[in-house]
Image (cartoon, rainbow, N blue to C red):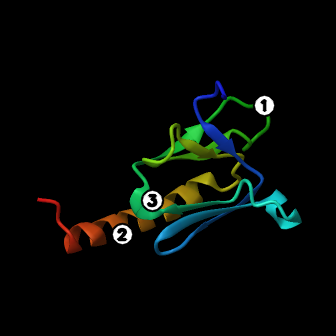
Amino acid sequence: MSTTPTDYIRNGVLYVTENYLCFESSSSRSGSSKRNKVIKLLDITDIQKYKVLSVLPGSGMGISIATPSTQKPMVFGAMMHRDEAFEAIYTQYTKIVTKATAINPET
């Protein structure tokens, strides 16, 4: 069991589609899909910009994502264009949640 407060994920490509956030690990190209992630945008309970202390420029920048199925937030880290990625993910997340709420209001 890890003592870190988050599941820190890096070295790959993060994609946002209409309904999903997908991460393809660089190591998956060699046959291992262990670190690949597919997250339904509607399952996201929290999304935040994340910064860890680091001596390397940009290596401490990331995005923290929480879902009901994760015991601790997943941090997609070491991002070079973190702010742009965050805006793209958050914009699509807001769109899909607004659309789902309009179709199925919970009240």
Corner quadrant of residue 44: bottom left
Q: Residues within 10 Å of mark 1 (few under 14, many from 20)?
A: few
- Residue sitting nearer the eye, 83 or 17: 17
What residue would you read off at disc 3? 90
Q: Residue furthest top?
A: 3
Closer mark to the observer between disc 1 and disc 3: 3
Corner quadrant of residue 60: top right
Identify which amino acid the numbered label 3 is placed on: Tyr
Q: Residues within 10 Å of mark 2 (few under 14, many from 20)?
A: some
Evaluate if marks 1 and 3 touch, with contact meaning CB atoms under 8 Å apart: no
What residue would you read off at disc 1? 55
Q: Which residue is at a point 85% across and 65% down the rendered structure image? A: 31
Q: Secondary structure at mark 3?
A: helix
List x then y, in percent, for residue 103.
22, 74
List x then y, in percent, for residue 52.
64, 33
What residue would you read off at disc 2? 95
Lower position in the chain sequence, tag 2 or tag 3: 3
Q: Secondary structure at mark 2?
A: helix
Q: Which residue is at a point 21% across and 69% down the rendered structure image? A: 104
For the C terminus, give its image quadrant: bottom left
Residue 19 lies, with reference to residue 90, above or below; the image says below
Lower position in the chain sequence, tag 1 or tag 3: 1
Q: Which residue is at a point 84% across and 66% down the rendered structure image? A: 29
